[in-house]
Image (spheres, helix red, strand yellow):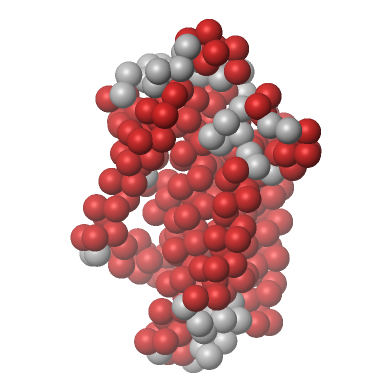
Amino acid sequence: MFREFYALFAREILKTYRNVAVVIMMVAQPIIWLAFFGSSFGSAPKAFLSEFFHTSNYIAFLLPGIMTVSMLFVGMFGAMSLIQDKRLGFLRRILVSSPSKSAVFLGKVFGAMTRGLFGIPIMLAVAVAFGVVLPANPFAYIDLIAALFFFSLGMVSIYFIITIRSSDWQTPGVIANFINLPLMFSSTAIFPEALFPSWMRTIATYNPVTYAADVGRSALLSTGVNLWYILYLAIFGIAFMALGMFLSKKWLSAD
């Protein structure tokens, strides 16, 4: 099964980096987010930023949130590739050969997740260009990658679970956007919890986007990472990956 998984995973990676438009968008998207959204608080009083954002540079606060949110959208578009494989007949050819349905699911999930993680160094470099001072501690980046890995594992699995039984281009995208936007705006990815009304604070408390963004923020701002947050994300990611493997055995088909 590992050989089958690796072959399908490698296909996903090669397919991405042979598409010049996709590579350009992977580079341009974080620059656009940080340049335009990050500049929205550029003229805010530093006392306001320090009190609510715990940093005088809003881009430093925003950076981990944008990394987390980018995983949402990478996962959504990655899941749509399953529809393409169904329509082009590739999935049918795969399923009648040796690979198990679990290997197909895991190859797709880890392929999409890896594409998202490849964007992290680009975002860090862009943030430095905007004046963000990154920590020298290598363990900070280990915590950041661990949080994003488990968060992405869970979210990408959810998107593929949605797509398993679908052959329509529009349905997975509509459902994924219905999930993405509430998750993004009800988390601390863009704004601190202190600015939320009470009902949004309740949602943010259980929102995995909040946990991933807070781990990354604590790591990059050197304020001390809460390891329980990483454990929460690990449980979230592994649980949905296991659910996706189980459902793919039952539901995944070429139609």
Residue 83 drawn above or below residue 174: below
Q: Where is residue 206, by image quadrant?
A: top right
Say which of 20 and 100 sits in front: 20
Q: Where is residue 163, by image quadrant?
A: bottom right
Q: Which residue is pictured at 52% across the width and 52% down the height?
A: 72
Residue 165 drawn above or below residue 8: below
Would residue 96 appear left or right of 182 to someone viewing this image? Answer: left
Q: Where is residue 105, by image quadrant?
A: bottom right
Residue 64 in the image: state x and y as whole percent.
49, 33
- Residue farthest to the top, as pictured: 47
Q: Which residue is pictured at 60% across the width and 61% down the height?
A: 178
Residue 71 drawn above or below residue 66: below
Residue 75 drawn above or below residue 220: below
Q: Which residue is pictured at 69% across the width and 43% down the height?
A: 207
- Residue 98, can we see it? no
Say which of 50 and 16 sits in front: 50
- Number of on-image labels: 0
- Residue 238, can we see it? yes
Q: Which residue is pictured at 46% across the width and 17% down the height?
A: 44
Would residue 150 appear left or right of 115 to someone viewing this image? Answer: right
Say which of 170 and 161 sits in front: 170
Would residue 90 appear left or right of 51 to someone viewing this image? Answer: left
Residue 88 in the image: state x and y as whole percent.
37, 87
Residue 126 in the image: state x and y as whole percent.
30, 31
Residue 245 in the image: state x and y as whole percent.
64, 69
